[in-house]
Image (spheres, rainbow, N blue to C red):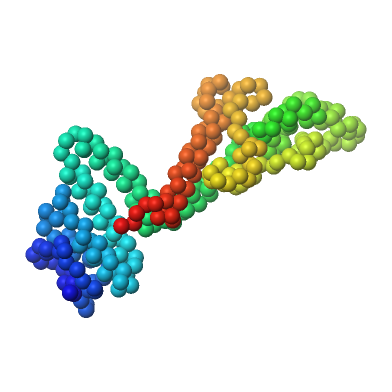
C-alpha cells in the first residue's frame, strides 16, 4: 500500500497502516512527514500515543534512501513517547517517576540524539578541550606546581624557582637584593651581569623534570582513559610559598584565589569527561536503543 502524500485535511487514522514507499510527488523530508503524522486524531498523539505510524514512516523513509530524515522522525517519536508517559501519570508517585525518567530521556536526546547522534559527545569534548587548553595557557604565574615532593625538598633548587614553576620568572616584582642573589648563586663576577632566573632555574631543575603543557594537561584531565603523565606530575595550588592565597578574588588577601577556581574547574572537566565518554560508548556500542 502506498502512503498518502503529506498535507492538510481531516484527521488520518494511521495506526496499523503499512507500506513500502510514499507516492510520487510526496514530500520525503522529515518536517513534512512529521506534520503529516500530526494529522492523526488527538487520542493517538496524546497519552495513548501510537508509535507504530512513526516507526513505519521512518522505515519507509530509510528504505527510500532518506536516512537523515528517518533519524529525525525516530527522534521525534521518542520525544512524543516521553511526553505521553508524563500525560499518562495520574498519581503523585507515577508523576515523580515519569519526571525522573524524562530527565534521563532528555539527556539522551540532547547528548546523543537517542543514539542517532553519536558524534555530539566528541564535538562537545573538542570544544571543552580547546577552552580548557586556552584557560590553562592563560593562568597567572604560580598557579600550577609539580606534585613531586622531591622538587620542593631539593636544596639545590633556589626558593625563587618555586614561585613560578612554569615560566621560572623568579619573584615578581623583583626583590631589592635580586641581582646580588642571582650573582651569589651563580658565582658571577661583579663586572658581568648575572643570568636571569629562567636560566638559573632551568639548570637547577632535574633533566627528567616534566614541563607543563597546557594542551596535554587539559586532555589528560578531560579524558578518563588517557594518561599523559601531566595530571600526575602537575596540580593547581591554592597558596603561595608564604601560605597566602594565590591571586585572591576580591579584597580579602586570605580569601579564595585562582587556585580554588582552577581546582573546581578541574572537577568539572573530570565529571564532564566521564559523562561524555560514557554517553559516546553507549551510543557506539548500541546500549542505548535507537528505536
Residue 61: percent from left, percent from top: 28, 69
- In the rendered view, does 289 fall on the left or right side of 57? right
Quarter assignment of residue 138 = top right
**Residue in the foreground of this view, choosing between 240 and 38:** 38
**Residue in the foreground of this view, choosing between 148 and 243:** 148
**Residue 96 appears anywhere in the view:** yes
**Residue 138 appears anywhere in the view:** no
Q: Quadrant of the C terminus?
A: bottom left
Relative height, residue 177 to residue 143 (above, below): above
The residue drawn where x is 51% and y is 40% is 270
Residue 82: percent from left, percent from top: 25, 48
Residue 261: percent from left, percent from top: 52, 32
The residue drawn where x is 89% and y is 31% is 187
Residue 7: percent from left, percent from top: 16, 68
Q: How many marks?
A: 0
Relative height, residue 237 to residue 20 (above, below): above
- In the rendered view, does 2 fall on the left or right side of 251? left
Q: Quadrant of the N terminus?
A: bottom left
The residue drawn where x is 43% and y is 55% is 285
Relative height, residue 112 to residue 188 (above, below): below
Residue sitting at the far bottom? 24
The residue drawn where x is 16% and y is 35% is 91
Amino acid at each position: 500500500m502506498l502512503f498518502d502524500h503529506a498535507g492538510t485535511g481531516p484527521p488520518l487514522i494511521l495506526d496499523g497502516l503499512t507500506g513500502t514507499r510514499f507516492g510520487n510527488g510526496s514530500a520525503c523530508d522529515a518536517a513534512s512527514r512529521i506534520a503529516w503524522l500530526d494529522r492523526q486524531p488527538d487520542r493517538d498523539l496524546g497519552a495513548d500515543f501510537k508509535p507504530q505510524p512513526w516507526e513505519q514512516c521512518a522505515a519507509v523513509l530509510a528504505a527510500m534512501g532518506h536516512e537523515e530524515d528517518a533519524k529525525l522522525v525516530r527522534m521525534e517519536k521518542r520525544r512524543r513517547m516521553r511526553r505521553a508517559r508524563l500525560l499518562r501519570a495520574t498519581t503523585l508517585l507515577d508523576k515523580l517517576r515519569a519526571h525522573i525518567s524524562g530527565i534521563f530521556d532528555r539527556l539522551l536526546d540532547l547528548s546523543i540524539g537517542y543514539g542517532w547522534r553519536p558524534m555530539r559527545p566528541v564535538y562537545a569534548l573538542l570544544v571543552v578541550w580547546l577552552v580548557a587548553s586556552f584557560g590553562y595557557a592563560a593562568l597567572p604565574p604560580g598557579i600550577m606546581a609539580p606534585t613531586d615532593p622531591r622538587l620542593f625538598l631539593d636544596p639545590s633548587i633556589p626558593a625563587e624557582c618555586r614561585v613560578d614553576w612554569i615560566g621560572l620568572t623568579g619573584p615578581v616584582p623583583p626583590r631589592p637584593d635580586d641581582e646580588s642573589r642571582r650573582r651569589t648563586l651563580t658565582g658571577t663576577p661583579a663586572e658581568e651581569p648575572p643570568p636571569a632566573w629562567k636560566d638559573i632555574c632551568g639548570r637547577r631543575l632535574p633533566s627528567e623534570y616534566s614541563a607543563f603543557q597546557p594542551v596535554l594537561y587539559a586532555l589528560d584531565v578531560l579524558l578518563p582513559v588517557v594518561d599523559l603523565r601531566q595530571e600526575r606530575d602537575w596540580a593547581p595550588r591554592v597558596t603561595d610559598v608564604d601560605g597566602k592565597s594565590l591571586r585572591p578574588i576580591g579584597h580579602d588577601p586570605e580569601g579564595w584565589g585562582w587556585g580554588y577556581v582552577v581546582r573546581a574547574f578541574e572537577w568539572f572537566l573530570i565529571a564532564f569527561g566521564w559523562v561524555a565518554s560514557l554517553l559516546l560508548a553507549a551510543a557506539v556500542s548500541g546500549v542505548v536503543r535507537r528505536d
